[in-house]
Amino acid sequence: MIAIDKTLISDDLAQVKFVCDLHKCHGACCIEGDAGAPLEMEEISLLEDHMAHIKPFMDPEGVAVIEKNGVIDFDEQGDWVTPLINDKACVFVVMNDGIARCAIEEAFEKGAIPFQKPVSCHLYPIRITKNESYEGINYHRWDICETALTKGKKKGVCLYQFLKEPLIRKFGEQWYERLVERIETHKKLR
């Protein structure tokens, strides 16, 4: 484990090689699972404030769920998550050439909204668990990501490198620089 400020980071971030391979997994992480994407409080407000600009990028089924139930749901632990369509796909999933994409991200890329997508999606396959003292940063192992492990090994890219942008988005540039420094120091000591 690596400790930085109030975060405990799993060694997996430095050891697991990972590069998403959307052409092989087809974005299954947005379609499979037992709950929607975890949401932070400020993301709920952003979704509510910008929903009119996101809806044009969504599939009709997703829009219907949002109009009926709103932009949030709760998982088994009572945490905020995106709603699901038929207890399966995230409401914001849109299929593009057989690959699941995010309507929020598409709206962002077209300049319609000022935020990219929920940070939990941007960080995947990292999941964050919170308690009163710290945030745990852990790799979520899932068989749908097997091709990402193969591609990561082939390219020699570790999780912390693959997820540089979302880690900086969540924790800041200085935090990320400290993470890299700790990982590199640990490698030299081996």
Image (cartoon, grey):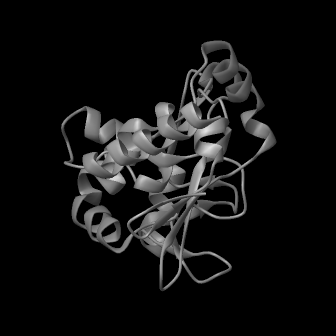
Q: Is residue 87 above or below residue 130?
A: above
Residue 120 seen: yes
**Residue closest to the far right:** 143
For the point 27% across and 33% down, which residue is it?
Answer: 109
**Residue closest to the far front:** 189
**Residue 161 x, y percent position in the rendering:** 48, 32
**Residue 47 x, y percent position in the rendering:** 31, 62
- Front residue (pair 154, 24): 154
For the point 42% across and 46% down, which residue is it?
Answer: 179
- Front residue (pair 158, 77): 158
Quarter of the image where the N terminus is located:
bottom right
Q: Is residue 63 left or right of residue 131?
A: left
**Residue 20 x, y percent position in the rendering:** 59, 28
For the point 63% across and 48% down, which residue is it?
Answer: 11
- Front residue (pair 179, 146): 179
- Front residue (pair 133, 101): 133
For the point 71% across and 28% down, which residue is it?
Answer: 149
Quarter of the image where the C terminus is located:
top right
Q: Is residue 98 above or below residue 44?
A: above
Q: Is residue 145 left or right of residue 115?
A: right
* Residue 33 falls in image quadrant: bottom right
**Residue 172 x, y percent position in the rendering:** 28, 52
**Residue closest to the far top:** 154
